[in-house]
Image (cartoon, rainbow, N blue to C red):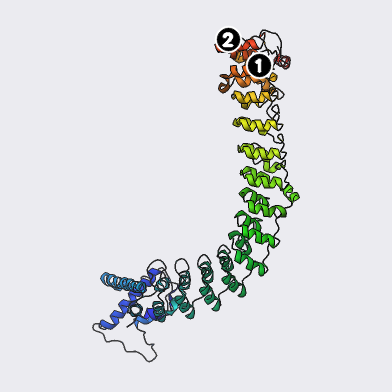
Amino acid sequence: MASTLAFEDYSMYSNLSEDQLLQLAIERSLDEVNQMDAPLPQVPHERPPTRQVNQPIRQPQTARYRRAPAANPNFHNPPGHGAAHYTQNEITETMTMLLRLKEAIFEAIRVGDAARVKALALTPGTNLMLPNKPGWLAIHQAAWFGHHTCLRALISVQHGMVNKRTDHGETALHIAVNRENLDCTIILLQNGADPDSTNYDKETPLYKACERSNTALVAMLLDYGAEVNFHCIQGWTALQEAVVRNNVEICEMLLKAGAKINATNVYGIAPLFTAAQTGSIDALRLLFQHGADINTQAADGNTALMEAVKNCHEVAVELLLSQDADANITGRHGLLPLHIAAQNGNEIIVSMLIPKTNKARVRRCGISPLHMAAERNRYDVLEMLLNAGFDPNAVLSEERSSLYEDRRRTSLYFSVANLNLDAVQLLLSHGSATNLDTLPPLMVASRQGTIKMVTLLLEHGADGNVSVPNLRTSFPPLLMFAARDLPLLKLLLDHGLNAESCFNCPLGTSPTPHSAASQRTRRQRWRYTRAQDSTQFFSFCEMVSSPTVSRWVGPIVDLLLDYVGHVTLCSSLLEHLDSYSDWSRIKEKAGDHHSTKVCYVCNRLKRAMGA
């Protein structure tokens, strides 16, 4: 005799937990065994009461299970009935029997034995609503393995399980579609499976069929009335999934079924945008034919053209431009498609975008494609842009320049910082100015110690004596980066570096105190005065007093003296030269070091110190 529970409508038990269903099945099985085998109970010394005419007939014990019991915390031990009146051995044996039946039916489904599946489904005690793993029922097992005969047998026994979900919210139809099991899909649809059911990601079977790019499944689901404009949890539609796979046939089917061509996901991305982003050329052409908005913008302001450029889809860029896509729309970061192409170094795309890009629009962006090409060392793109007439002296806007710690502004600076000698030469040959940056490119090249680049910059008019804001020195600040590199220092001196200013020391030539403490006090007084007075200058002798430079003082002064006439060495420099015996001859090059000549800031210093 088949279990009553197996034939009852599943919907009556949909509010029960797995443990409650297991308990119900155990009690059902034990009740059925008792009814068939156990003798009727006898009450000692009493006759069974006779039924009165108007007394209702008492229903058999199993009748109470004809209705689905309401879920409650006392379900396992309802008052006056339940597993409590069965022995532990009976319950254990019944549970073991049920588990074996469950395992047997899942194994039969796995091997595709439809006859055994049906026989087990009709066996007393079999409960098709008991899962083999979380939320996974026999009908899901059959859909997964694609055994349509097993699926048909299960449905014939328990039709109410057709739309039962797994723990991921998937119905058997979801599983059959995802596994591309056509026979199982048609059986489920014929037996009332909901084509618009959604899993926990809000994906419908139609969405999964488009994701699998299976035309037959899509056609089958559409024939059964599947809704085409459902949005998944990320807002994607079935059409966008078909576009990603570049499946024109499915796209046409969906559009004929009413798919919205400009529907967007949560990021504001429409199907046309998706086609450009993925380089789906056939789908892109189809969307054009159906009137898709070619200049659609995502939530971040990017257009389909910009996405095609970003992903280097050359054919897609060409197709979009041929359909009059606007190349002068900026994205969230204020960049045009040409900026992105220059950054990527794609010469073909750059050549297509140059004639479509408005130079005035580029200037309003506050950044030139030349900056992007120079920053990424895209030499060929840099040359194309310069030949197309883009301004080599375009500077970054204050907002964009402030993003860099060194406040760089020009394309030349980017190329110098990248040690790209070829790019520097190219920019200089097209008229790049060498003095437009806050920190001169010559100073950057000197700090890097690149003789060739320094030479190139000097030959194109770079000024070695240029001052730097917020760096007040009594000598050319370039010396701070070139002092320890004597060949570089000589090159700069040959091109006009002012060596004489190095000997204009605020400390003057007054005698140096004999004690070390007095010397330190004197220097500290001078540094304190300079710190209090923003007009005071950082002196050369103070710079060479740094521990990293002091051991080079002799050779540096020796070289500088070759480019000046008669100068007076300050007491600090004399002290340095006296610290090493081989440097004594250097003092003779400067003339009479006991001269009372004082530099132009010495008197002001004395007045400030009260001397």
Q: Closer to us: mark 2 or mark 1?
A: 1
Q: Is residue 437 in view? A: yes
Q: Regarding mark 1 in the picture, which secondary structure is present there?
A: helix
Residue 196 on image: x %, y %: 54, 73
Residue 377 on image: x %, y %: 61, 43
Q: Which residue is mark 2?
A: 515
| Image quadrant assignment for residue 314 | bottom right
Please report the residue visible at 46 percent of the width from the left and 77 percent of the height from the top: 188
Please report the residue visible at 44 percent of the width from the left and 68 percent of the height from the top: 166
Residues at discs 2 and 1 in contact (Cβ within 8 Å): no
Q: Sort mark 2 into few (<14), some (14-19) or many (20+) by Cα contacts within 10 Å.
A: few
Q: Quadrant of the N terminus?
A: bottom left
Q: Sort mark 1 into few (<14), some (14-19) or many (20+) by Cα contacts within 10 Å.
A: many
Alpha carbons under labels 2 and 1: distance apart? 29 Å
- Relative to 40, is 173 on the left or the right? right
Task: Pick whichever, 10 or 586, lies toward us.
Answer: 586
As shown in the figure, which amino acid type bears the numbered disc 2? Ser
Q: Which residue is mark 1?
A: 561
Taking the view exactly as shown, the residue that stands out farthest to the bottom is: 53
| Image quadrant assignment for residue 234 | bottom right
- Relative to 225, is 466 on the left or the right? right
Residue 448 on image: x %, y %: 60, 32
Please report the residue visible at 60 percent of the width from the left and 38 percent of the height from the top: 418
Q: Which badge, 2 or 1, comes first in the chain's sequence? A: 2
Q: Regarding mark 2 in the picture, which secondary structure is present there?
A: loop
Q: Quadrant of the C terminus?
A: top right
User: Up-down: is 415 above or below 558?
Assistant: below
Residue 435 on image: x %, y %: 71, 34
The circle on residue 579 is none
User: Up-down: is 512 above or below 486?
Assistant: above
| Image quadrant assignment for residue 473 | top right
